[in-house]
Image (cartoon, rainbow, N blue to C red):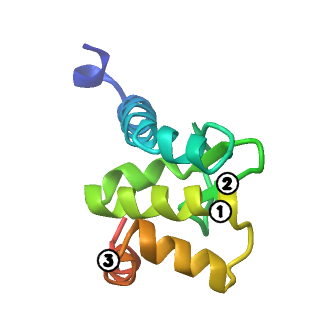
Amino acid sequence: MAARTGTEEEVERLLSAWFRERAQEQFSKRLDAWHEWCREQNLPEPKAHLRLMPKRWGSAQKDGRIYFNPDLVRTPSICVDYVIAHEVCHLKYPQHDRAFYRQLEKNFPRWREIKHRLEMSEL
């Protein structure tokens, strides 16, 4: 129980590690729901990775790696689902063009509302 007697820095480190573990679990679990869609689209199987990104919630790579800001786990679940849908759509459409937004609309019809909610989230 180091957190009970630890310094503020130790407590912060333990809490941060706990949040990272929850983030990896949650993002991987939610991303699993997209595996079949990706297979149907002939896209690589998406894999969740964590990366601190000061100005982004997520980032997708051509090979299926999707990087998530671990702080995303502190937002409402629907916001996590929006970021996942957004990044999965980037596996098919790398740019923010009309085709990308059509796909996002099809996969996550409430994306505008949820994006706004995410932007209003205070971390």
**Sequence order check, earlier mark of 1 and 3:** 1
The residue carrying mark 1 is: 90
Question: In the image shown, does 3 or 85 lie closer to the viewer?
Answer: 85
Secondary structure at badge 2 equals strand
Other-residue count near label 1 (Cα within 10 Å), few / some / many at <14 / 14–19 / ≥20: many
Mark-to-mark CA distance, 3 and 2: 21 Å
Which quadrant of the figure contains the C terminus? bottom left
Q: Amino acid at mark 1?
A: His
Separation of marks 1 and 3 at Cα, in angstroms: 17 Å
Q: Quadrant of the N terminus?
A: top left
Name the side, left or right, on which 54 lies relative to 76.
right
Give the amino acid type for the residue marked by disc 2 in the picture: Ala
Look at the numbered discs 1 and 2 and tell me whether their residues touch, using CB distance below 8 Å: yes
Q: Which residue is mark 3?
A: 110
Give percent across and percent down for residue 114. Answer: 33, 75
- Residue at 69%, 83% (x, y): give it: 97
Please state if 46 lies on the left or on the right of 73 as rendered.
right
Residue 24 x, y percent position in the rendering: 45, 34
Alpha-carbon distance for marks 1 and 2? 6 Å
Image position, residue 63 (x, y; %): 76, 42
Q: Looking at the image, how many numbered discs can be counted on the residues?
A: 3
- Of residues 8 and 61, the one nearer the viewer is 61
Q: Which label number is shown at residue 60?
A: 2
